[in-house]
């Protein structure tokens, strides 16, 4: 598994202004599948408003790594470290 800083940096957007990250609450935060980049979007409104799986949460982050939108769930960090 890559170092924590490198892992979080890989979740930031590279082509569009925002990225959507899926957090899987059914695995521990140290698991590689805990946080995965799903897609990049042009605007937070383009990110999903809800997540059908109750053990998952979708979060949109800006280029700096600040949370700009999220679905319900307790595990997503407000800032990507």
Image: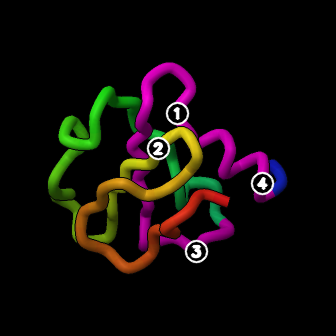
First-in-chain label (3 vs 2): 3
Q: CA distance from mark 3 to mark 1?
A: 24 Å
Q: CA distance from mark 3 to mark 4?
A: 17 Å
The quarter of the picture where residue 71 lies is bottom left
Task: Say which of 21 and 12 sits in front.
Answer: 12
Q: Is residue 32 left or right of residue 55?
A: right
Residue marked by disc 2: 62
Question: Which is in the foreground here, disc 3 or disc 2?
Answer: 2
SS state under label 1:
loop
Residue marked by disc 4: 5
The quarter of the picture where residue 69 lies is bottom left
Residue 28: which disc?
A: 3
Q: Bounds of the magenta span?
A: 4-30
Q: How many marks?
A: 4
Instruction: Classify 10 Å Cα crowding around label 1: few (below 14), some (14-19), many (20 and above).
Output: many
**Magenta-span inclusion, residue 16:** yes
Task: Say which of 5 and 23 sits in front.
Answer: 5
Task: Say which of 11 and 34 sits in front.
Answer: 11
Q: CA distance from mark 3 to mark 2?
A: 24 Å
SS state under label 3:
loop
Report if the CB atoms under discs 3 and 2 are less than 8 Å apart. Answer: no
Instruction: Classify 10 Å Cα crowding around label 2: few (below 14), some (14-19), many (20 and above).
Output: many
Q: Residue at x 58, y 46 (%)?
A: 64
Which residue appears farthest toward the bottom when viewing the image?
74
Residue marked by disc 1: 13
First-in-chain label (3 vs 1): 1
**Where residue 33 sits in the image (x, y, percent)?**
55, 54
């Amino acid at each position: 598994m890559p170092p924590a800083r490198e892992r979080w940096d890989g979740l930031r957007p590279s082509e569009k202004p925002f990225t959507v990250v899926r957090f899987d609450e059914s695995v521990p935060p140290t698991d590689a599948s805990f946080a995965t980049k799903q897609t990049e979007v042009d605007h937070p409104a383009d990110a999903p408003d809800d997540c059908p799986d109750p053990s998952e949460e979708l979060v949109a982050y800006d280029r700096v790594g600040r949370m700009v939108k999220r679905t319900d769930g307790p595990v997503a960090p407000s800032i990507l470290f």
